[in-house]
Amino acid sequence: MSQKKAAKPAAKKPAPALKTAKTKVAASSTKSHMTENRVFKPSAEFSKNARISSMAQYKRMYEESIKQPDKFFGREAKELQWTKPFSKVLDWKCPNAKWFTGGKLNVSENCLDRHLNGPRKTKAALIWEGEPGEKRVLTYQQLHREVCRFANVLKRHKVKKGDRVVIYLPMIPEAAIAMLACARIGAIHNVVFGGFSAESIKDRVVDSGATLVITADGGYRRGSVVPLKKNVDDALKGNDTTVKTVIVYRRTCQDVHIEEGRDVWWHRELEYVDAHCPAVAMDSEAALFILYTSGSTGKPKGILHTTGGYLLHAQMTCKYVFDMNDQDVYWCTADVGWVTGHSYMVYGPLALGATSLMYEGAPNWPENDRFWRIIEEYAVTIFYTAPTAIRAFMKWGDEWLKKHDLSSLRLLGTVGEPINPEAWMWYHNKVGGGKCPIVDTWWQTETGGHMITPIPGATPTKPGTATLPFFGVDTAIVDDLGKEVGTDEQGKLVIRKPWPSMLRGIWGDKKRYQDTYWSEFKGWYFAGDGARRDKDGNIWIIGRIDDVLNVAGHRLGTAEVESALVSHPSVAEAAVVGRPDEMKGQGIVCFVTVKEGIQTSRDLSDELKKHVRKVIGPVATPDEVRFAAALPKTRSGKIMRRLLKQIAAGEIIKGDTTTLEDINVIAQLVSSGED
Ligand code: WTA
């Protein structure tokens, strides 16, 4: 121990204890799960009609999927339509997986064409409702036609197999049409969430080397217009990207700038094309899309997904986890800009020939019952949403639900973050009327589809656990050395075998792919989440153990927010941590030191919040900015996030502070929040 530090008078003071918790402790499942004894078995009626109707059946299938993956997945993959059959199920050289090698298929053909030869031709593929209330239904036949036409528009603009196309659209059918059109001609789409800023678009355009951007004049959100085209204009300012063409869909009809020679209107372009567009046969391992997600360093990573394995997993999970049938009206509330929108609004349900509902706007517009209104009106049978939304509904009160008939629902799902048992129970009783199984699905952008989840006709569920692994998913919870931890002990979640929809890389960064996912434990995929397994084998996800935040189910890197903060001229240094938040799961707290001569003030704190919002997007808006003279650092200069997290959460500082360089810093930080 350093003599220098011991000599400092401040070091003699005990670490300050902070007893005044300002934020209520989060709706986290971690405390209660050790004692959670409520078990909900699927009803006999649900099980009777389900594809998998008992634990014995699940276990048999799971065992086969792990012990004989070639047999299991080879059989399942035959349900896809292959232009050329595959010769081998899996070719695995860690960390590179090739699934269904030799096979050729097209995702859009699987999602559309193959449903046109029977009664599904006239069935609703997409049901859409705009926030202002417009309604559209696209049958499989109509969706196929629109996709073919738009694919021809892309071809007209010289988009070829392997080219990258950025899609920055609101939640309108054209988002699905654009994705499927790219898939049809073998272009790689890169959907950017409409809540991201111009700078975030630019980063993604540049990193992916996109040549074409598809956007709209605007989108509706909570009664106002999000200026999407304006954001694209700002992103492309200076003409220093590879983008040659911007296709603009007219949605909100306000005036927008049209850059001569670059921008064209979607509806005009359609006038030049017909509806005949054969699907290109793609290698099973050809890239399908890139989707950027946050990691623990500043730069978001372009997660790469490919064709055959991804589609199989998306279809299979819709079949077994959502137990989707031709009669179902299925609604996933996720935005198409996140992986959930990709796999579970577009690709999975359409591959299976189901009806997928899409809603453009906010859940509380014009009133708090918009979702329940939609469920009633369209007789939604399967509803998939996020815990953060469920907690908001709970807060808004049961009377909004009571106004509506939700009896069409037969299955509920959640995704995005751990669900706290109170929210689970409310969802079960109030939304599901006590009769619908809940599938709490754990997965990630990287995994492409569900990884740990109940099978609704088989698995006994407990509020707060995602329960058991899906087929082919070999999970383990291990300590730092890779040794499995005991029952109820916390460890790191790893996956020990490749699975069909696993990411195939990080766009343009092989080394980062290897380092991020495959280096902590050799040969195993490291998910970045902490977890425990209870005595019944159920897996309880604790949450991220890296520097990634999960704010209202959205992933954000602390480093991303920090670099946005330090790009402000007043900021010298910043450290960002999550703090438990009753509604959002986690809130964003920023500890900031300012440059010499800068006065801290409430105005500056507001300005910094706005600045982060501008740089990354509204999803990243900080909840709190705390100014400090210095940040707590170890003597080797590392910021002690553990302490900052405790301070942000208003907890008593626990653990070892002996490596801290200057203990005074802590006292200042604690008091900086007490204004
Ligand atoms: C978290 C979203 C607990 C987890 C599909 C993961 C969950 C991150 C759950 C991935 C769940 C997702 N229970 N935590 N059911 N689902 N997570 O990439 O921390 O946006 O690592 O993918 O969300 O977020 P992503």
Image: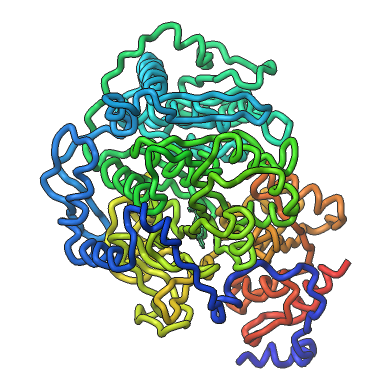
Say left or right for 566 vs 89.
right
Say left or right for 349 vs 311.
right
Q: Nearer the viewer, residue 471 or 305?
A: 471
Say left or right for 358 vs 470.
right
Place residue 637 in its image quadrant.
Answer: bottom right
441 lies above or below 646: above
Name the outermost residue toward the top: 272
Q: Nearer the viewer, residue 319 or 179?
A: 319
Residue 486 location (% of width, % of height): 41, 85
What residue is at 26 percent from the left and 20 percent from the top?
Answer: 278
Residue 341 location (% of width, % of height): 48, 42
Q: Nearer the viewer, residue 222 or 154?
A: 222
What residue is at 18 percent from the left and 50 percent from the top?
Answer: 75
Tell me, yes or no, if residue 456 can be seen here.
no
72 lies above or below 642: above
What residue is at 39 percent from the left and 77 percent from the top?
Answer: 478
Name the outermost residue toward the left: 87
Q: Quadrant of the C terminus?
A: bottom right
Tell me, yes or no, if residue 107 can be seen here.
yes
Q: Quadrant of the N terminus?
A: bottom right
Residue 414 location (% of width, % of height): 52, 55
